[in-house]
Amino acid sequence: MSPRESCWQGRLVGGHGVASGRAVDSPYPAGTIALQRPCFAALGLDLSGFAAATLNLDFSPGEWRLQQPDHRFEQLRWTELHPPETFSFWRCRIRHLARTEGSPPWHPALIYYPHPDTKQVHHQPASVLEVLAPPLGTVTPGDRFELCLDSRRCRLIQPARLRAQLLEFLKFRVLAAQEAFFTGGAAGDAAALRPWLQQHWPQACDLSDADLQLTLEQARFLYTEG
């Protein structure tokens, strides 16, 4: 394993059935992956070695933070049924842990990420990754898979734990400054807090604005005298 890799175990869950075309009410009987393949190939990404379906892997209770993809395609019009979408892909490795004879083989794979802000329906929870892999034989919901990714660009975070760590990090700063900590500009709200954290404790920047705001409010309640 590369020093830059982190490996995580996830559980296969049922998807919407649209990528593979298995959903009975899907407007894409061939599946979206089959329809999108020629578009991606024309832009330099060959998906011919991957199954025309995604593995939906759930890593609950974590949430994924993805950045700096290996491939990103902006506003791709692959169908006339809805507006263009933006897609990102990250290279990774996968193995099916249900294979019990010897060490399960590793396979090259891709995280397949239709950007939620351009995707009208069929959104995924933050704990789920859609993965393109070669044909792996029979797989069943509940099967466990191991996924290895570049840890600098793909991180699985535990928001509750990270909020608790941030609350502790803020404790003595708020106790020392009291209300001035919140009115001085650096931490008036989540938007102001984020650049300050980037300088002082960048790990916390993986939290959403809502989580940052909640932690600020908790710190104010717990650590100020008024």
Image: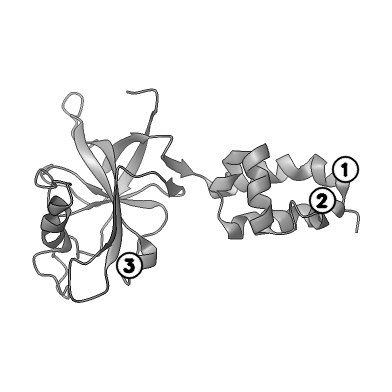
Identity, as a three-letter code, of the amino acid under mark 1: Ala
Residue sitting at 17 percent across and 73 percent down? 26
Q: Position of 101 compared to 1: left or right?
A: left
Residue 94: x and y, percent?
A: 24, 37
Q: Secondary structure at mark 2?
A: helix
Which residue is under mark 1?
Answer: 176
**Earlier residue among tags 2 and 1:** 1
Q: Secondary structure at mark 1?
A: helix
**Residue 162 occupies quadrant:** top right
* Mark 3 to mark 2 CA distance (whole Å): 39 Å
Identity, as a three-letter code, of the amino acid under mark 2: Phe
* Mark 2 to mark 1 CA distance (whole Å): 9 Å
Can residue 109 be seen from the camera position used here?
Answer: yes
Which circle marks residue 181 in the picture?
A: 2
Rendering colour mode:
one colour
Above or below for 200 versus 58: above
Tag 2 and tag 1, C-beta contact below 8 Å: yes
Residue sitting at 86 percent across and 53 percent down? 180
Residue 183: x and y, percent?
A: 82, 57
Observer-nearest of 160 and 201: 201
Identity, as a three-letter code, of the amino acid under mark 3: Lys
Q: Position of 12 compared to 215: left or right?
A: left
**Residue 201 occupies quadrant:** top right
Residue 225: x and y, percent?
A: 91, 54
* Mark 3 to mark 1 CA distance (whole Å): 46 Å
Residue sitting at 74 percent across and 51 percent down? 186
Can residue 143 be seen from the camera position used here?
Answer: no
**Of the residues tagged 2 and 1, which is closer to the observer?**
2
Which residue is under mark 3?
Answer: 119
Residue 60: x and y, percent?
A: 42, 49
